[in-house]
Image (tube, grey):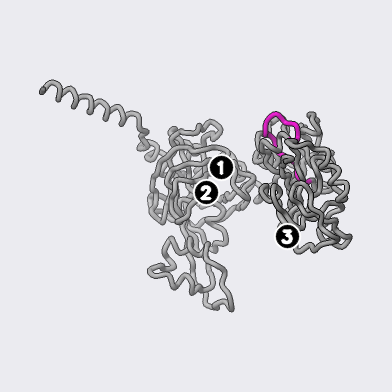
Amino acid sequence: MLKRLLFVLALVVFAASSSAKDLPDFTQLVEKQGTAVVNISTTQMVHGNMVLQQIPGLSEDDALFDFFRRFQPPQKGPREPREHKSTSLGSGFIISADGYILTNAHVVDGADEVTVRLIDKQEFKAKVIGTDRRTDVALLKIEASGLPKVTIGNPEQLKVGEWVAAIGSPFGFENSVTAGIVSAKRRALPQESYVPFIQTDAAINPGNSGGPLFNLKGEVVGVNSQIYSRSGGNMGLAFSIPIDVAMEVANQLKTGGKVSRGWLGVVIQELNKDLADSFGLSKPSGALVANVEKNSPADKAGMEVGDVVQIFDGKTVESSSDLPRLVGSTKAGKKVLVQVWRKGAAKELTLTVGEAPVEKAAQSMHGSGKSGKPSTNRLGLALSEPNEAQRKELKITHGLLVDDIDGQAARVGIQRGDVIIALNDKDVKTLEQFNQLLAQYKPGSRFALLIRRGANSLFVPLKME
């Protein structure tokens, strides 16, 4: 009996020791690289805010003050004249021994004063060399030398499931270390088309923004930027900017003070299986062109609405999120070969990449009215032909207004006020022509409608029922 008990205890000890060996040890990483992680505090003179002052126990020096300030509803009525000093906290890391520091653009956005605090408690006033809101990257400079710096890694070598660690100042708690795994790579987020984010489940909270994400080799592979949260705290969904993207932006900010990006002048959308079938593709890969801006580089090269961009400058476009990143990282003026799928066959285009213009606010489509009696078709669409004034207001030369929706049209997301511009590669000009085009499709056939919605265009896949 005693021998059996000792044997069981030995197994337990062996299993525990084996499990401990399998878990990663971050101690050396923190010792070697943690000294290059800094705390960033900013101050900004802002108008008084009674909404925040009414939150019990929340002072203006609290790290949560700035967090709630970002998400409060806009004030109504006259603003208070009183000004006060607002402070916020973030993280960053030293990339060169002479004092260049990477952080997030939103950490220093609007700041009147930026202070960098090292792990040894030294404090420096930092100069903002430049910021880039599209990637949420900022480059700072402090007057110092001989500083510890991080080792830059290669995020392309990261594997999903690999261990990673984050160091930062969540809620002001300096040099806090958290760990997790890479949950996904090349994650596309809304309005963030230039960044293929690294998703991780490491605990990231307000104040971690701008801090480094390390692999087990102690190399920085990302800049912690965003979290998905319903509470404001960690929920295991954090997103980091790949360090190669951040360093490219930092180098441009350092040399020129701004970021220059390539530009095609197209609106694209993701391909799903139904759309791929509609365009005769064997799989849903590539970027579907939904709109081509007049006189843009794409227009001059002969790119058309309905083209599917498959290869850009020798690089495969697997999904629509790949194309903005590839184009944006291409130098303006460079001639590139682009392979598109058009009307059932591959076609090569040569285009000269332009420089991305200053972003314009998207225009909204206001009430379009009706012209004539709506006609209901087999898709559940009540359509009408716009008059000249409506076409001018909508900035279209052809198309049909969607006056009402039902059935399949409603299920696929078509909305009142949309304009049907084309059916697959055929421009839609009149109700009669559109119904004739529909009559060519037998039950079970797949096709796509090009929809104009406000300033944007998108293809919507349908199946004839």
> Disc 3 residue type?
Ser
**Label 3: which residue?**
364
Does the magenta segment cover residue 279?
Answer: yes
Query: Looking at the image, do the residues carrying marks 1 and 3 touch, with CB atoms under 8 Å apart?
Result: no
**Is tag 2's residue or tag 3's residue first in the polypeptide sequence?**
2
Task: Give x and y (percent) for residue 252.
Answer: 64, 45
Identify the image quadrant of residue 197: top right
SS at circle 2: strand
**Label 1: which residue?**
197
Task: Give x and y (percent) for residue 331.
Answer: 72, 40
Q: Residues within 10 Å of mark 3 (few under 14, many from 20)?
A: few
Residue 102 to residue 336: above or below:
below
> Disc 2 residue type?
Ser
**Is tag 2's residue or tag 1's residue first in the polypeptide sequence?**
1
**25 left or right of 337 in image:** left
SS at circle 1: strand
Identify the residue at horizontal 83%, vertical 48% (top origin). 294
Query: Looking at the image, do the residues carrying marks 2 and 1 touch, with CB atoms under 8 Å apart?
Result: yes
